[in-house]
Image: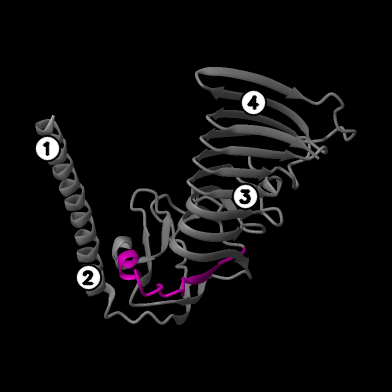
Amino acid sequence: MEKKRSGWRTAGLIAGVGCLSIVGIVVGGVVIAVIWARSIVGDLDTDPQPVDRRIALSAPAADTARGPEKASSRTTPMRLTIDLQEGEFTIKPGQPGSEIRVEGEYTPDMYELTEHQDTDPASGVRRVTVRFRSKAPMWARIFAGFGSGGSGNPPRLTVTIPRGSPIDLNLQMTMGKSEVDLGGLTLGEVSVNAAMGEHSIDFHEPVVEGLRELRINASMGKLALENLGNARADTIHASGNMGEVTANLGGAWPAGGTSSLTFDQSMGELTLRVPNSVRLDADVRSSQGGETTSRTTQDATPPDAPNAPTLRVRVNSSMGEARVIRY
């Protein structure tokens, strides 16, 4: 019996030493990471500095190869990419002009604001990219903040897009908070990727001419879509993953027209708010635990206006909740 007890004591002692060794390795690794991180960012100036940058948009190139008699009378839209990471961002329409304005404050030693313009050699389309991102890796900034409270000064930028310029827009917003208003702009196609944060996309007023297509992708965060009718899009495709998406379908949809909207949601909550002033044809499919349910919604009492717009809404939801609310 005494030998058995001795064996249990030995096993317990070995297990205890093993646990302490693991804890020591973890603690030592964290200490090393903190020291290394502070060696990377410790000497940097963390005080935010104001910025007011104006990005002139070059004039569209003349299509001399086809000859003036074959030249299109419609201006080809430029491709504008705005890529914003880690901060608080506002994007809004501005006065007609030929420049994009970026203003606000950030720490130049920690972040960088860059711009690039070129022309697609195949199509002749102008391409403009405005990018804001961190210089130091995130893990270094996180570990460097241990015990020091962090800088507490997140970047804050406002990007103003001029009205009247035909644009195909690509928005990338990651790890932060953003408020975007695209109303009143001249847009052809819009693609939005919003991840890891709280984001809002609004069309406060109708866009000029209406969109051909609006594509939205959201992941690991919260996304609010407002006044989608003012986008006046032929098709809208939105997908969400591990987050919450709320879409208000109010606004000035084209009278008498039909628009197709598809929403795919996985592991999250999707809420669609649809005004009573439109005709609704909705098909909502939900998958839970290997079982799929489907429900179809059509107006029992269509709107009185004979030229009321029609919305064909298709919803696919898995491992979450999807609902359509009329108001």
Residue 192 in view here: yes
Instruction: Characterize the local packing of mark 2: few (<14), some (14-19) or many (20 or more) Cα atoms within 10 angstroms.
Output: some
Q: Residue at x 13, y 43 (%)?
A: 14
Which residue is the extreme one toward the front?
A: 1
Front residue (pair 211, 151) = 151
Nearer the observer: mark 2 or 1; the answer is 1
* Relative height, residue 195 to residue 292 (above, below): below
User: What quarter of the picture does the N terminus occupy?
Assistant: top left
Q: Measure the C-alpha gap from mark 1 to mark 3.
A: 64 Å
> Which secondary structure lies at badge 1?
helix
Front: mark 4 or 1: 1
Disc marking residue 284: 4
Residue in front for this viewpoint, 175 or 9: 9
CB contact under 8 Å: marks 4 and 2: no
Residue, disc 1: 6
Query: Which is more N-terminal, label 1 or label 4?
Result: 1
Mark positioned earlier in the residue sequence (2 or 1): 1
Residue drawn where x is 56% and y is 57% of the image: 166
- Check if mark 1's residue and mark 3's residue have beta carbons within 8 Å: no
Q: In the rendered structure, does residue 157 fall within the stretch colored magenta?
A: yes
Mark 2 and mark 1 residues within 8 Å of each other at the beta carbon: no
Q: Which corner quadrant of the image does residue 258 belong to?
A: top right
Q: Work out how far the residue at label 4 is from the one at label 2, CA to CA, in angstroms.
A: 53 Å
User: Label 3, on which residue?
Assistant: 224
- Picture residue at 30% right of the left edge, 61% below the top: 139
- Quote the CA–CA distance across marks 3 and 2: 40 Å
Reading the image, the residue beneath label 2 is 35
Quarter assignment of residue 236: top right
Magenta-tinted stretch? 141-163
Whole-percent x, y for residue 206 in the image = 70, 53
